[in-house]
Structures are given as C-alpha cells and as structure tokens.
Amino acid sequence: MSELIIFGSGGHAKVVIEAVRARTPDRPIILIDDDPSAAGRVVLGIPVSGTRDWIASNISGSPVALGIGNNRGRSELLDWLASEGCEVEPVVHPSAIVGSTVSIGAGAFVAAGAVLIADSKIGEAAIVNTAASVDHDCQIGKAAHIAPGVRLCGNVSVGERSLIGVGTAVRPGMSIGADIVVGAGSAVVTDLIEAGTYAGCPARRIDA
Ligand SMILES: CC(C)(COP(=O)(O)OP(=O)(O)OC[C@H]1O[C@@H](n2cnc3c(N)ncnc32)[C@H](O)[C@@H]1OP(=O)(O)O)[C@@H](O)C(=O)NCCC(=O)NCCS
C-alpha cells in the first residue's frame, strides 16, 4: 500500500490521521508542515518530516491529503499541490455514511459519523466534520468547512472557503455565499450572500 503524505500537524491533522488509520491501519503516513514551529513535532506518534520542500523531492509520487483547518490556507495548498502535479487524495472516515451518488472532491475530508446523501457534491479540499449531516442535493464549495454537528437540509449550497459553525442548522434550499462565517449554534433561515460573519437564531450579520 502506498504511503500517504499528510500536510499539516495541528488539531485537524490529528483528526485526519485517525481517519486514515481507522480505514487502513497499516498505511505508512508522512507528516509535512510549513510552520517553522512544527519542526521536531510528533503527532500521534508520527514525527514531522519537513516542509513543502520535502514534497518537491518526493520522487516516489506518493499522494497527499490535506491536514490543515484554515480554509484559505487549505485552498491555496491544494492549488500549489496541483501546480506541482501531486495527486491529492480525499480522506473519508469508515464510520461516515456516504451515499453512492455523492461526489467527493480531491483533498476533501469526511469525518467520523458524518452522513452525506443523495446527489450531494463535496468540493475539493472541503471538510464535513464529525457527525455533520449533508442532505440531498447539497453543494459544498471548494475548501468550505461544515463543522461538527451541523445540519444541512436538502438543496443547500455553501460557497468557497465558508465556515458553517458547530451545531448550526440550515433550512432547505438556502444559499450561503463564499467567505462567510456562520457562528456556532446558529439557524440559517435566509440566504446569506455577502462575505462576512453571521450568527444567531435566525443568523444575522454581526460584523457589519
Ligand atoms: C461567530 C464567531 C466567528 C464570532 O467570533 P468573534 O468575531 O471573535 O466575535 P465575538 O466573540 O467578539 O462576538 C461578537 C458578538 O457576537 C456574538 N456572538 C458570537 N458568536 C455568536 C454565536 N455563535 N451566536 C450568537 N451570537 C454570537 C457575541 O455574543 C458578541 O455579541 P455582543 O457584541 O453583543 O457582546 C464565533 O463566535 C463562532 O461562533 N465561531 C464558530 C467556531 C466554529 O464552529 N468552529 C468550528 C471548529 S471545528
């Protein structure tokens, strides 16, 4: 089995490592991180092997998974890996329920207990986190993050790099644009178009 390079060594990388081990316990994992403070770090028993320069010398062509939680950073990393010709793998925890008509983009992550069904599309580098649910016909944009316990009803769209905060509920058919943050525990009952931060029940703009 080919080794997997995981880019990142913080909290989100831990979650990704666990998911890879749950699916393929014997798969070798290499950790890479650009953050200088990560040098010498050991995460769940795996030492950080180097920075992105290490990838340039990765002549074996091992696939890469994305282990960083910041949405913009993850998006830019995906673009860089593509420009380097790297294969970028999605990671799906084996306890997630993923319908046969759901598509999952390169570098996306689906965490333990998530439920994704019926024609939903999970964009490249997107995260559907622990026990979140994504109902039929949802569209999750590139590098968006659906946080733990979020409930997306059917036909919801979430734009690129947006974060839907933990435990939020989104009414059927709502459109949430790009670069939007929805605060923890919110209820989205109208479309959210402009980039910015929204929170509450119902979710309203809090940074304007
Ligand atoms: C919405 C959020 C981004 C705002 O963070 P912030 O910019 O630091 O804002 P503050 O904490 O200073 O709060 C600003 C105001 O918004 C309110 N507010 C913040 N988060 C809120 C929320 N989730 N719901 C309702 N009101 C909220 C605060 O009470 C405060 O109100 P006040 O001005 O009347 O006192 C943050 O609170 C949040 O919920 N983040 C989501 C985190 C998450 O789910 N991460 C996923 C990890 S896997």
Image: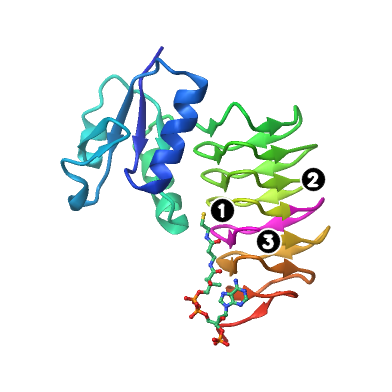
Q: Quadrant of residue 136?
A: top right
SS at mark 3 in the image:
loop
Quadrant of ligand 1 in image:
bottom right
Observer-side mark, 3 or 1, equals 3
Query: Does 189 appear above or below 94?
Result: below
Find disc 1 in the rendering and name its residue: 145
Find disc 2 in the rendering and name its residue: 137
Q: Residues within 10 Å of mark 1 (few under 14, many from 20)?
A: many
Q: Which of the two labelled residues, at mark 2 and mark 1, occupies the earlier sequence position?
A: 2
| Type of amino acid under label 3 | Thr
Q: For the residue with label 1, is its CB less than 8 Å from the closest atom of ligand 1? A: yes
Residue 137 vs residue 185, the one in the foreground:
185
Locate the C terminus by quadrant: bottom right
Q: Position of residue 84 (x, y in %)?
A: 34, 37
Q: Residue at x 56, y 54 (%)?
A: 144
SS at mark 1 in the image:
strand
CA separation, marks 2 and 1? 17 Å
Q: Residues within 10 Å of mark 3 (few under 14, many from 20)?
A: many
Q: Residue furthest top?
A: 1
**Span shown in magenta:** 152-167
Q: What kind of secondary structure does the magenta stretch mostly adopt? A: loop
Find disc 3 in the rendering and name its residue: 168
Q: Quadrant of residue 111?
A: top right
Observer-side mark, 2 or 3, equals 3
Q: Specify whether 150 is left or right of 144.
A: right
Query: Does 143 appear above or below 21?
Result: below
Q: Residue at x 52, y 51 (%)?
A: 143
| Type of amino acid under label 2 | Asp
Q: Position of residue 150 (x, y in %)?
A: 67, 54
SS at mark 2 in the image:
loop
Q: For the residue with label 3, is its CB less than 8 Å from the closest atom of ligand 1? A: yes
- Is residue 1 something that shows in the picture? yes
